[in-house]
Amino acid sequence: MLNINFLFYANFAIFSIFAAMIITELMGSILLLLNWKKYREPVLEYVVPVWEITGTFGAFWVVTADFAYPPILIPVASIFSFAIMVFLILFVARNSTISFAEFIRKRGWLDDRKLYVGYALSSIFLGLVLLVILSGIIGGNGVNLSAFRFSSLNWLYQPSGYLFIVGALLLMVGFAPVFYRVPSLSKLSLLFVAFGIIVSTLSFAMFRNWTLSPYVLVSDVIAILIPILYNVKNVAAIVSNKIVFISLLSVDIFSLNFMVYPTAFGGVLRVDSITNTGLLESSFIVLTVVGGIIVAALIALYAIAVARKVKEPSSIRF
């Protein structure tokens, strides 16, 4: 009989959606830093109404992870204590800068542009810290699991971590023109995504000691299809639709679940051994269903709000 760890897959599905949403913000942050005047309108039209939903989904994932893997949460928090501290500081900076930017146009030396640039920078560095943590969870980079310790020096000696971050950045740069509808960069989009797939796949292989699962092809195919379809005139509007894109990206990330299951931290930790059972398993299922419905409702409200803004462009303020 096939045993399926439903808690792991449910929690990983939540993480996949959260990761997809925060990646869309990172893509917008990159565009804002590249050319504020040119990309301000399409980026802020998306980011301003959705950034709180992203944070809510992140909190939702953390809570469900507490139910799914209670034996490992405190050790993981201990291992990545410094990185988590930096992440939280950057998260506060991200939230405060964008919330002030929504109301402040000009206050002496401070204006909305500086605040949005602060939001973009804090978001990008936040993403980098998250990628470092993920490299430790996936490949064990810099992690001494028996001592509950993370060594930055050991992390620096492992090139798979660098490739993981570079691959992720290349993919984000490549996906940005699709999500934010920048047709002039459509050809560059395909190029960056192709290179991002190559670098990311190489990092995955190094994480797994060059024994990579063929399932990685699922992720690679989905990733390359996004810019390819964006270069097809009749389907470009469909693939760049916010809900469609986030759905595709979530499925893409979810298809990489084999990187941390059945083992994580470079094959040292068996996930089944730290997954919850019994009463808390039932609580997790209830929490996931109820929380999922609430977050889905928030996303639906966002989609309706964006649709109304598209119909009434004069109502959009920047």
Image (cartoon, helix red, strand yellow):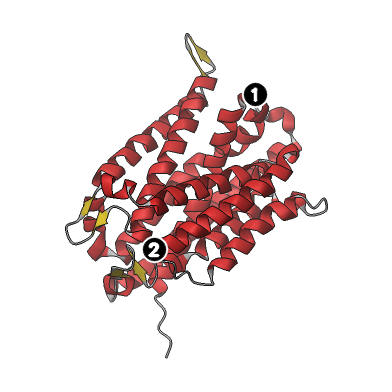
* Residue at x 47%, y 52% (from the top left corner): 18
Looking at the picture, how far across and down is residue 46, in whole percent?
60, 39
The residue lying toward the viewer, choosing from 208 and 295, is: 208
Q: Quadrant of the C terminus?
A: top right
Callout 1 crowding tier (Cα within 10 Å): few <14, some 14–19, many ≥20: few
Q: What residue do we see at 53% from left, 71% from top?
A: 215
**Residue farthest bottom in this picture:** 1
For the residue carrying disc 2, how many other residues have a C-alpha within 10 Å: few (<14), some (14-19), or many (20+)?
A: some
State the mark number for residue 287.
2
Residue in front for this viewpoint, 85 or 134 = 134
Q: In this view, does 273 lie above or below 138?
A: below
Residue found farthest to the left: 147
Q: Is residue 105 above or below residue 60?
A: above
Tell whether 314 sits left or right of 116: right
Where residue 44 appears, as percent x and y from the top left, is 60, 33
Residue drawn 64% across the image and 48% down it: 242
Q: Is mark 2 on a helix, strand or loop?
A: helix
> Which amino acid, by three-letter code, is at mark 1?
Lys
- How far apart marks 2 and 1 lie (CA) works out to 43 Å
Identify the mark at residue 235; answer none if there is no mark. none
Residue at the image position 73 percent from the left and 32 percent from the top: 313
Helix or strand or loop: what does disc 1 sit on?
helix
Say what amino acid the circle numbered 2 marks. Answer: Leu
Q: Quick one: which residue is furthest to the top in this view?
A: 108
Foreground pick, 84 / 152:
152
Name the spot of residue 269 as percent of width and height, x first. Answer: 28, 68
Earlier in the chain: of badge 2 and badge 1, it is 1
Q: Where does residue 159 sit, x and y in percent of width and height?
A: 40, 51
Residue linked to disc 1: 37
Decide if residue 274 is in sight here: yes
